[in-house]
Amino acid sequence: MKYISFLIIVSIFSLVSCNQEDFLDKKPYDKIITGDVIIDYPTFEAAAKGVYNIFQDTYYYNSYSTILPDLMSDNVKNNDYFVFGDIDKYETKADNRYADRMWQKMSSLIAQSTIVIRQAKEFDFGSKQQEADNLIGQLFIARGLAYFNMQRFFAQPYNFTSDASHLGIPLINEDEVGINVISPARSTTKDVYNKILDDFEKGINLINEDIQSPYYLNKYSAKALLAKIYLYMENWSAANNLATEIINSGMYSLLSNTEYVSSWTLNDTSETIFSIVNSDTDNSGFSSITYYYGRPRYFATNDLYNSFDDNDVRKELISNNKALKYTSPDRDDNIPIVRLSEMYLIQAEVLSELGDDEGAKNALNMIHLRANPDAVPISESGDALKILIQDERRKELMFEGQRLFDLTRKKMSFIKYSTSVGTPIDILYPNNLAILPIPQKEIDANDNITQDQQNPGY
């Protein structure tokens, strides 16, 4: 992350006559921070909302970080296309440009949000203080989410070691970033997750409950994301409490079986908890997830397609191995980050781990029977039930950037299908290449990350 002390991009938007969706549709101009970016509430609001533009970037949710967890798993394979070709073949090198771009984009969001939080906490917003606190809360959640995503891509899962003492990503010096050159060392995975939890706790204490727009973080979406983080940490009780709170809040509802497929043509639905917004004039174009899946540059594997029963409505979202969750002709599909269905799947998993198989089956059947109302309800228990929960996660969350992380955190071996390689690749757990390399540029520039601290295998 050394470079972020030289160039911190802050997105400044015009605030005149903009509603929330208009705000996210505007292209920002870039400004290097050389002093105080916050001089009043409007400048703070602009800088805070600029963070969402990083989420929307091609190198983040709009493409790379959503595609790769499916491509690196058993869900998706490259259609002989050069983008992500080495990653698809599990032949990634330390200087891989796609890994480098993701690292830069996520660390930029961390740096930008940190600088804006620091300045906002020192500013007196007067009558606007309550609104400012809400935005500060959003920034804490956004930073914690960026740390979480970066950790998942560039470090082994939380349970890789019994005490999470293995190397994670760097944690920046929040007082120095944007002021002095910083060279953060890699922290332990435990310390990274503690930081993520701290950011979420601070954010949830400040953020409000407004759910008018699913494109901005609020208390409910923050708690839904935190439920996922606790799931990865295997803190079953905490994950269950939060997932159950979201389900019981009444703020969201599951779509019906007949609504499900067509819902993927809509901007958002009653299930949408948090989503990345795109418009016909503000999207990633030929680098968008819609273009990559629609071209198609990337195919659903036969293994994924054959995992569905014929009467499972979700099978309709794959046609001739083409993924159909993102199909807008303008390449402006919104990118779902967390949906209500995932809360039921989290609830099912954690209850099964806590020994409440009946509760787990009830939660899982909400998704299983929604997909096919005529299916036989799930009745298995124990390990058989746990396997079915992961199978259901695979089918419900396909193409949403989840599969690889589920496989690795559950310590599962799998088969990677690759058009280029031809012969399926056995990815046995633990696998060094199931995470991305620390970019060689970072190692070369950062005196506190040595070559022997590179992820093994690179």
Image: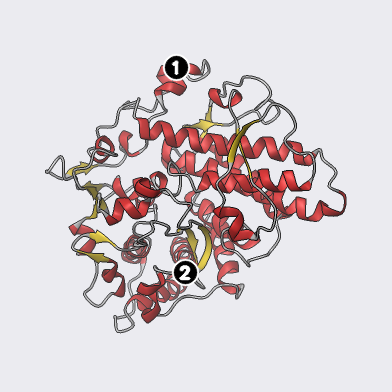
**Residue at numbered disc 2:** 356
Tell me: 191 left or right of 62: right
Tell me: 250 left or right of 321: right
Q: x%, y% of residue 351? A: 48, 65
Decide: is 323 above or below 200. below
Along the line of sight, the residue nearer the viewer: 32 or 17: 17
Q: Residue at x 35, y 45 (%)?
A: 68
Find out whether the residues at labels 2 and 1 contact each other: C-beta distance under 8 Å. Answer: no
Q: Which residue type does callout 1 highlight?
A: Asp
Residue with the most extreme bottom position: 374
Residue with the most extreme right position: 126
Asked whether the viewer can see residue 216, the reply is no
Q: Which residue type does callout 2 highlight?
A: Asp
Along the line of sight, the residue nearer the viewer: 438 or 84: 84
Classed neighbour count for the residue bearing mark 1: other residues with Cα under 10 Å, few (<14), some (14–19), many (≥20): few
Q: Residue at x 42, y 28 (%)?
A: 438
Tell me: 110 left or right of 87: right
**Residue at numbered disc 1:** 444
Q: Please name the colour scheme applied to the rendered image.
A: secondary structure
Q: Residue at x 40, y 78 (%)?
A: 259
Asked whether the viewer can see residue 390, the reply is yes
> Looking at the rendering, in which quadrant would you find the C terminus?
top left
Identify the element where label 2 is drawn: loop
